Amino acid sequence: DNGGYEHYLLKEISEQPDTVARTLRGRIDDRFHIAHLGGLNMDARETRSFRRVKIIGCGSAYYSGQIGAQLIEELARIPADAEPASEFRYRSPVVEPDTLYVAISQSGETYDTLAAVQELKRKGGRVLGIVNTVGSAIARETDGGIYLHAGPEVSVASTKAFTSTAVAFALLALHLGRVRDLSPADGRRICDGLRRLPEQIKEILTLEDQIRELAKKYADAPGMMFVGRVRGYPVAREGAQKLKEISYVHAEAYPASELKHGPLALISPELPTVAVVPDDELLDKNLTTLGEIRARHGRILMVGHRTSEAADDCIVVPRNEVELDPILLTIPLQLFAYHAAVALGRDVDRPRNLAKSVTVE
Ligand code: BG6
C-alpha cells in the first residue's frame, strides 16, 4: 500500500518524522542523559573496553556508517571508521579483540555484509547489527544490536532506513560517550537535539515545492558534482548515490578540499555542484570552495543553514546540534533525487539494474 503517494519512495521519504520517532522511542533517558539500548547485550565494563569501532555495510548503509563513525569519534572520542563490507571481507582483515564491529543492513540479508559478519565471528570479533528487518540473517548472526523500527522499506533506493541508521548511531555514540567522558551537559544537549529531529524533518518536507522546481532546473545537466567537508562529506556521498540510483544522472561526490586536486578540471556550466554547507566551524572554508567553483562558471546549489550569495540556489534546513546536522541535511537531497528522477520519467521505485536486497556475491 503506497498510502496514496505516487511512489513508495516519496511515501518513505515523507514518513521520516514518524520513522525517526520510532527509532528513538523509549531509548532516551532524561535522568542521566543516556541512551537505553537493551539489545546491545553489553555491560558498562565491556562497553568501556573498546578502543576502536569498525563499521561495515553496502551502498547507502555504508554511507550512513560514515556518518556513524563521525558521531562515535565526536561524542565518544573512540577512533572509528566505515568501510564497504565487501572490501572488508575480501582483504582478510585484522580482527582485534578490543574493536567493536558494527554491521549495518536495512534488509539484514545483504550477502556481502552477512559474509563479513560471519568472517568476523569466525575470528572471534564482537559484532553488533544495526538492522531494520527483525529476525533477518544479519540480526541473527550478530551478538546484539539496534533495530531501526522504521517499518518495511519497499522502494529500492534507501531513504528512511538511511536516516534511522544515522539516528541509531547517534544513540550508540551517546551511549559509548556517556560511559566514557561525554559530560552530562553534552549528553543532555544531544538528547534534546535528537528529540527535535521529527519536527525538524517535518519542516524540511514543507520545502518540497521549492526542491521540485530546483530538481527540474538541474535535472537536464549531464552530470553533477556533490561536495562536502567532514560532517557534510557523507551527506554529499549519499546525495550523489540517490541521484545516480534513481535518475541515472552521473554524479560524483568529493570532499570539498579535494576538488582542487583534480576534479576542479571538470567544473563548467554543464556540471553543476551540490554543496553541503552546514553552519559549523568549516563554513568559511566551504564558502571559499564555492568561490573556486564560481570562478570556473560552475552553477551551485547549496544545502545548508543559510542562504549565500556564493551559490545560485539555496535550500535552507533547520539547525540542530552540529553533530546531528548530517541527519537533517540528507533529507532535501532525497527529495532532490526523487524529483529529478520524476522529471526525467524514470522508474523511481524500481530503477534499472538494481535490486532491493542483494543476496548474491
Ligand atoms: C543495495 C540497495 O543494493 O543494497 C541499496 O539498492 C542498499 O539501497 C544496499 O543501501 C544495502 O542494503 P541493506 O539491505 O544491506 O541495507
Image (cartoon, rainbow, N blue to C red):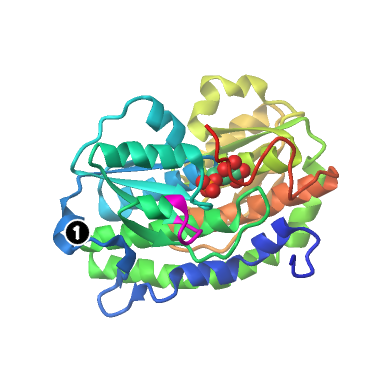
Q: Is residue 222 magenta?
A: no
Of 172 and 340, nearer the camera is 172
Which residue is at a point 43% across and 42% down the rendered structure image?
114
Residue 19: % across, % down: 55, 67
Q: Is residue 239 visible?
A: no
Q: Which residues are magenta?
A: 131-137
Q: Main secondary structure of the magenta part?
A: loop
Q: Which structural element holds mark 1?
A: loop
Quadrant housing residue 169: bottom left
Q: Which residue is mark 1?
A: 181
279 shown above or below 202? above
Residue closest to the far bottom: 31
- The residue carrying mark 1 has its beta carbon less than 8 Å from ligand 1: no
Is residue 134 within the magenta segment?
yes
| In the image: residue 166, left or right of residue 188 | right
Residue 266 visible in rendering: yes
Residue at image location 78% in from the left, 54% down from the top: 212
Q: Position of residue 14 (x, y in %)?
A: 67, 65
Q: What kind of residue is marked 1?
A: Asp
Q: Residues within 10 Å of mark 1 (few under 14, many from 20)?
A: few
Direction from residue 38 to residue 345 in the image, left or right:
right
Q: Residue at x 72, y 59 (%)?
A: 8
- Relative to the observer, which residue lies in front, 358 or 259? 358
| 79 versus 145 height, above or below | above
Image side of residue 130 versus residue 45, left or right: right
Residue 75: % across, % down: 30, 55
Q: Which quadrant of the frame does ligand 1 lie within?
A: top right
